[in-house]
Amino acid sequence: MTFKNFVKNDNNNVLEASYRVSYRIVQQGEAHTIAESLIKPCVKDVVASMIGEEHAKLIDCVPPSVTTISRSGKDVSNFCEKGSL
């Protein structure tokens, strides 16, 4: 695997993870800030305990910002409205 492919795949994984979390947050009607204040620290704790600290550091790559979650929620909503789901 080349570095370019690794980065591409890694970026896709980060984007997918961000969208999955965003979807769950929007689906539950939770405040966007819950990702940064609760979900991300919990995920890091679970990953560190189960897999190791080195992998837990990768969680920092997933952007749980309000803008990202808002945009992801709109994207998922648009996707569903078009009947693509």
Image (cartoon, rainbow, N blue to C red):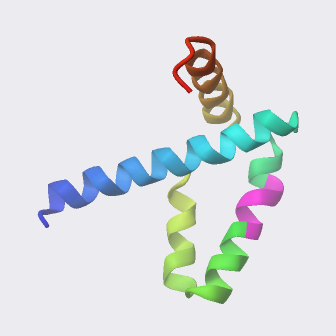
Q: Residue at x 82, y 55 (%)?
A: 37
Please say whether residue 31 is one of the residues in the magenta stretch.
no
Residue 67, placed above or below residue 79? below
Residue 28 occupies quadrant: top right
Task: List x then y, in percent, for residue 71.
Answer: 61, 25
Which residue sits furthest top? 82
Q: Residue at x 50, y 57 (%)?
A: 61
The N terminus, quarter of image: bottom left
Near-viewer residue (26 or 33) = 26
Task: List x then y, in percent, for residue 51.
Answer: 56, 86
Q: Residue at x 87, y 38 (%)?
A: 30
Q: Is residue 35 left or right of residue 29?
A: left
Residue 73, placed above or below residue 60? above
Please state the extent of the stretch shown in magenta in the rendering: 37-42
Q: Residue at x 49, y 46 (%)?
A: 16
Q: How many circles with numbers are drawn on the protein?
A: 0
Q: Is residue 84 left or right of residue 1?
A: right
- Kindly report the secondary structure that dominates the magenta region of the rendered protein: helix
Please say whether residue 41 is one of the residues in the magenta stretch.
yes
Task: List x then y, in percent, for residue 53.
Answer: 56, 85
Q: Is residue 65 left or right of residue 61?
A: right
Residue 79 occupies quadrant: top right
Residue 19, placed above or below residue 54? above
The C terminus, quarter of image: top right
